[in-house]
Structures are given as structure tokens and as C-alpha cells.
Amino acid sequence: MRGKFITFEGGEGSGKSTHASMLAQRLKALDIDCVLTREPGGSTGAEIVRHIILSGIAKPLGAETETILFAAARDDHVRMTIEPALAAGKWVISDRFIDSTRVYQGALGKVDMKLIRSLERVTVGATMPDLTFVLDVPTIVGLARAKSRRGSGAADRFESESTEYHDDLRRGFLVLAEREPKRIVVIDGRAPRDVVAEKIWDTVESRLLGAETAAP
Ligand code: Z5A
């Protein structure tokens, strides 16, 4: 049987990496083979593109070029990591995926949604997530968490944007969730880690594990 595909989305410091990893551990404890991955990145070629994007050297080339770079990374990630794992019956958990492009490059970067959807069709095709979590935290909370985790290291290309930018990001993800309630579930990420993890687990159980055991 084909595996399930779960993605985590949200702004900086919302807890995506933390909860993607906690969910992977919980699935592994149930003997469910699972691949934990991330975007941009998650495959050899995509990790090279990640380095180019997050260093900020592509920013002067404009939002459309950045969008195409994200798409190039995603194409490699889907073909080399996600699709083979799902086909082998493994579950895939990705820290960010298409909704990040829709919000960062689309809603905020003002890149034409027609270009974004066309790139999605080419890179993702039918490999759409079965379930997406948007971890929602106020900007001030997310940036404080990201800063405390980074320590004295330099802020990356996106972390250095203004508070208004991060507020718009938050709204952008909530708008997507309103549009696709069957796929996207919003989780309040302000709660303590274990509380957030439990809400995520309840959703996975009812939407994906429940569906699997109920199947004939
Ligand atoms: N990007 C894009 O523009 N277009 C695209 O298509 C894609 C991406 C795919 C990738 O950066 C950047 O690329 C991203 C968007 C853009 N923007 N930025 N920056 P990244 O991968 O380097 O970083 P990130 O995706 O933004 O994640 P993050 O900053 O690493 O945050 P996070 O994964 O959401 O949070 P975390 O690492 O799990 O948690 C942060 C800290 O908070 C950490 O110390 C945790 O221990 C702590 N934490 C987590 N949960 C809690 C709770 N519940 N309570 C207290 N503390 C907590």
C-alpha cells in the first residue's frame, strides 16, 4: 500500500521542525516506516539549491527567479526522495512544501499564481500531501523562538524581514487553510510542546490511521 504524505507549514519558529520530528518518532514507535525530510532540500540536488536560496545571493534576481529555484529544488526532492518512499509504502513527513511557495512567493512576493500553479503541476503532479499542518503562532513568539535557537548565528534571508512581513505570512497560511479545510489543519502552536504534539497526533489518528484501519 502507498504511504501517507504529511507536511508542516507556518512561519519562522512556529515549531515545524520540532513537531515533524516528534511525529516521525511516534510513527516509528508504531513500526510505521517513515521518512523525515524538509524543503528547500531533502535530496542531494535540492540541498545545493537550498544553500543558494537561503544565503540570499539569488534575491537580487527577483521573486520569480527565486520561485523557479524553489521549484527546481522541489522537483529533485519529489523525484529522488518523496515519490520513491511513498511508492515503497513509507510515510513521508516534510518540513515545508508547496504551501510555503504559495505564501512566501505568491501572497507576499507577488509572483503570479498562474506561474506557481504551473510549476506545481510539473514538480508535484499527483504527489499532493494527504494532510498539512499549519502551526500558527504570533510573529513575536515565532521570531523569539527562532532567535533563541539560532543563538549568536546570523539571521537568514527570510528571518531578516520586517515584523509586518511575518504578520502577512501568518495571515497567508490561515487563508490557505480556509480554502482547503480537507487537507489543511491549523494548530495553535503557542501551547506547550506536548500539548501541540497531542493535537497533531489526534488529527493523524483520526484522518489517516483511522482511515487505514477502517479500509476493507
Ligand atoms: N521558503 C520559501 O520561501 N518558499 C518555499 O517554497 C519554501 C521555503 C519551501 C526555509 O528556512 C526558508 O525558506 C523559510 C521559508 C522559505 N523561511 N525562513 N526563514 P528554514 O528551513 O531554515 O527555516 P524555517 O522553515 O522557517 O523553520 P525554523 O525557523 O527552523 O522554525 P520551525 O521549524 O518552525 O521551528 P522549530 O525549529 O521547531 O522551533 C524553533 C524553536 O522553538 C526551537 O528551539 C524549539 O525547541 C522551540 N519550540 C518549538 N515548539 C515549541 C513550543 N510549543 N513551545 C516552546 N518552544 C517551542
Image (cartoon, rainbow, N blue to C red):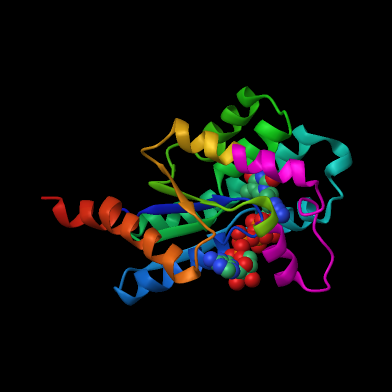
Q: How many numbered tags mark residues here?
A: 0
Question: For this view, does 102 lie left or right of residue 186?
Answer: right
Residue 47 appears in the figure: no
Q: Is residue 83 or residue 133 the one in the foreground?
A: 133
Is residue 67 or residue 72 the one in the foreground? 67
Which region shows up in magenta? 142-171
Q: Main secondary structure of the magenta part?
A: helix
Residue 174 drawn above or below residue 45: above
Q: Quadrant of residue 204?
A: bottom left
Residue 112 is situated, as x and y percent measured from the top left of the image, at 68, 24
Relative depth, front residue between 183 and 55: 183
Within the image, what quadrant is residue 152 found in? Answer: bottom right
The structure residue drawn at horizontal position 42% and vertical position 73%, both measured from the top left corner, is: 25
From the viewer's perspective, is residue 105 above or below residue 3?
Answer: above
Which residue corresponds to the image point at 49% horizontal and 54% vertical from the top-left?
Answer: 188
Give the left or right position of residue 213, taking residue 82 as reference. left
Report ligand 1 position as a quadrant: bottom right
Left/right placement of residue 49 relative to residue 177 reads right
- Residue 164 image offset from top left, x and y in percent: 75, 41
- The correct choice, above or below, for 156 with respect to 186 in the image is below
Quarter of the image with the N terminus in it: bottom left
Q: Residue at x 76, y 50 (%)?
A: 158
Considering only vertical position in the picture, is 5 above or below 122? below
- Asked if residue 174 shows in the view, the reply is yes
User: Does residue 152 show up magenta in the picture?
Assistant: yes
Which residue is depicted at the point 71% across and 28% down?
Answer: 111
Q: Is residue 101 shown in magenta?
A: no
Spot the residue most to the bottom.
29
In front: 24, or 197? 197
48 relative position to 100: left or right:
right
Residue 194 place in picture, x, y as percent: 44, 71
Query: Which x, y percent locates residue 163?
Result: 76, 47
